[in-house]
Image (cartoon, rainbow, N blue to C red):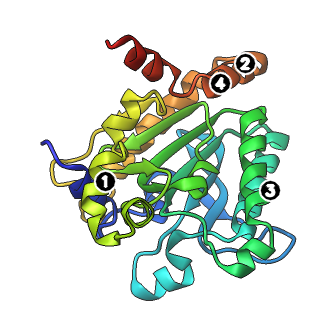
Amino acid sequence: MSRTAWEIVQIARDIKRPTAGYFIENIFTDFVELHGDKQFADDAAIIGGIGRIGGMPVTVVGQEKGSSVSDKALRNFGCAHPEGYRKSLRLIRQAEKFGRPVVCIVDTQGAFCGIGAEERGMGEAIARNLMELSRVKVPVVSVLIGEGGSGGALALAVSDKLAMLENSVYSILSPEGFSSILWKDSSRAEEAASLMRMTADQVHKMGLIDDVIAEPRTGATTEDEGMFARYVGEYIENSLKELAKKTTTKLLDDRYKKLRAFGQEYIIKNKSGK
């Protein structure tokens, strides 16, 4: 079914759309959540811990929006503070130490932009995640399940394999923010969405992600008893098995080349008019 970019934005934001917690519950067994960044606080917008997939121990880090009004407030609607990204970094370093692959579940409109977050080093926390994920010596698989906004999403999207669910979006900011900057009018968000090239198919064509995971016709929902989550789990498990065949040197070399080549194929094609 063909949908407009704005329709996909609405599906990505739907209250019934599965969150990171739902995917973790239905994909990973023996999951144990680990808390805190060991520096300031425990950010509930980031869920992290250790679990198993296909019998394989992995570290899981996910951005959690919450599933009810009170839960959303507790988790700051998935907008992490610096301590959330420092928690994810702590768990990623721990995974490297013990040789566990990392699975990241991305779903945020963006990092929290409050004064306190800036004072505690939001930019540094995101940048350090980018740097460490680019060179961590274990396989990394990321799946974008809903909204992927700005550096807040990018901080967990540097990976060996990056996939988007069919009805998810990935962009520099929200359509409302884009239209507010471009036209000084946030009411033109639908028009902005059509220009931003933010849908999974568009981002895939630009060479910024590896795969698009098809969803049920009506979109992913929490009312399917975990069936779609397990389907996503198969993608993650197969990706990890594929990456496990690589030596550490090959893994890091391929990741470096991938990051350096982001979007280049798309740019070259457009310059040549093909």
The span from disc 4 to disc 3 (Cα, nearest Å) is 25 Å
Q: Position of residue 250 (x, y in %)?
A: 72, 15
* Residue 26 vs residue 93, the one in the foreground: 93
- State the residue at coordinates (42%, 61%): 174
Badge 3 or badge 1: first in the primary sequence? 3
- Does dot 1 land on a helix, a strand or a loop? helix
**Residue type beneath disc 4:** Arg
Q: Position of residue 136 (x, y in %)?
A: 77, 36
Please name whichever residue, 47 or 167, is drawn nearer the observer in this view of the structure: 167
Q: Is residue 202 left or right of residue 24?
A: left
Quadrant assignment, res 223 = bottom left
Indicate which disc residue 7 carries.
Answer: none
The residue at which mark 2 appears reads as 253
Give the number of the mark in front: 4 or 3: 4
Residue receiving disc 3: 90
Disc 1 marks which residue? 193
Q: Which numbered mark, 2 or 3, is in the foreground of this view?
A: 2
| Badge 2 amino acid | Asp
**Residues at marks 2 and 3, CA–CA distance in whole angstroms:** 23 Å
Mark 1–mark 4 Cα distance, whole angstroms, equals: 27 Å
- Please report whichever mark, 2 or 4, sits nearer to the chain's N-terminal start: 2
The residue indicated by pointer 4 is 260
User: What is the quadrant of the C terminus in the image?
Assistant: top left
